[in-house]
Amino acid sequence: MIHCFKTTNILVDKLSICFLDYIVSGGSSGRQLNIALSGGNTPRAFFDKIALKQRKTDKPVQWKNIHFFLVDERCVPPDHTDSNYGMIHGALFGKIDLPARNIHRIRGEDDPEREAYRYEQEIHAQVPGKKGIPIFDWIFLGTGEDGHTASIFPDRTDLLASANIVEAVKHPVTGKPRITLTGKPIIQAKKITFLVTGESKSLIVRQIINQEPDAAHYPAAYINAQRHDTEWYLDTAAAKYL
Ligand code: 6PG
């Protein structure tokens, strides 16, 4: 399902309303909702908007029932400008009444292999699963101009079927270490939303959504093809060729 909006601001406005409606109704049931967020630049405006609108919902958000996880992290300390946790904390976590225990961050400052294993255990302890795969309630993804999603890059499509749910990887160009959820927990999530904005992503968006042959090795295209109910939130610049 593709949702396209004239501007990024209108997009994040609508998506934040939709997200808050979801967590108000789901969170009030008393059940723990497990949400995994991506980093990068694109979602910052969405997180800002959630923080801004959270006091305007009909019923109060029960933040105590909402647990946040990271889809991926760059291996840097949390106060580093590249830290996904740092970005999300600045835009959202630091502005809402969320208990610290509900934030499940990837410790980018620790040894990547060991931290990938530790994070996997933390997810298993928190998120109910089926056949060893945790089922997140909602996963938010982005994509890069090379077709990666999470930190699953086109040179590591093996991670889409990894038996581990979290892996340490290296960025294919910079060689910098990262830690990422792998394909199975992403594909098994109850709800998957890609948030993509800007003209620089318009070609990749067209290739992925139209399932063009060029997209065959794009991890984002694989996820989209596996899950026909994947939601796409695009601005008109990113949707230019659709
Ligand atoms: C990251 C991400 C990554 C991101 C895309 C898009 O850590 O970089 O989680 O998968 O979603 O790279 O990033 P931009 O929004 O910065 O273009």
Image: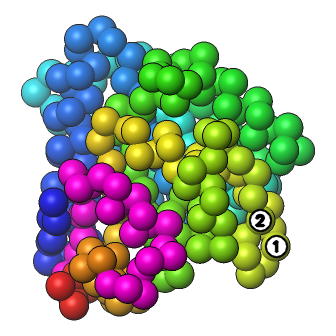
Disc 2 from disc 1: Cα separation: 5 Å
Asked if residue 26 lies left or right of residue 160, the reply is left
Which residue sits furthest right? 111
Instruction: Indicate whether residue 17 is drawn in magenta.
Output: no
The correct choice, above or below, for 147 with respect to 80 in the image is below
Q: Residue at x 55, y 25 (%)?
A: 132
Task: Find residue 175 and name its label.
Answer: 1
Q: What colouring style does the render use?
A: rainbow
* Label 2 crowd (10 A; few <14 / some 14-19 / many >=20): some
The residue tagged with tag 1: helix, strand or loop? loop
Asked if residue 24 lies left or right of residue 187, the reply is left
Q: Residue at x 41, y 46 (%)?
A: 187
| Stretch of the chain drawn in magenta | 212-236
Q: Quadrant of residue 138?
A: top left
The correct choice, above or below, for 135 with respect to 208 in the image is above
Residue 75: % across, % down: 78, 55
Residue 24: % across, % down: 21, 25
Which residue sits furthest top? 30
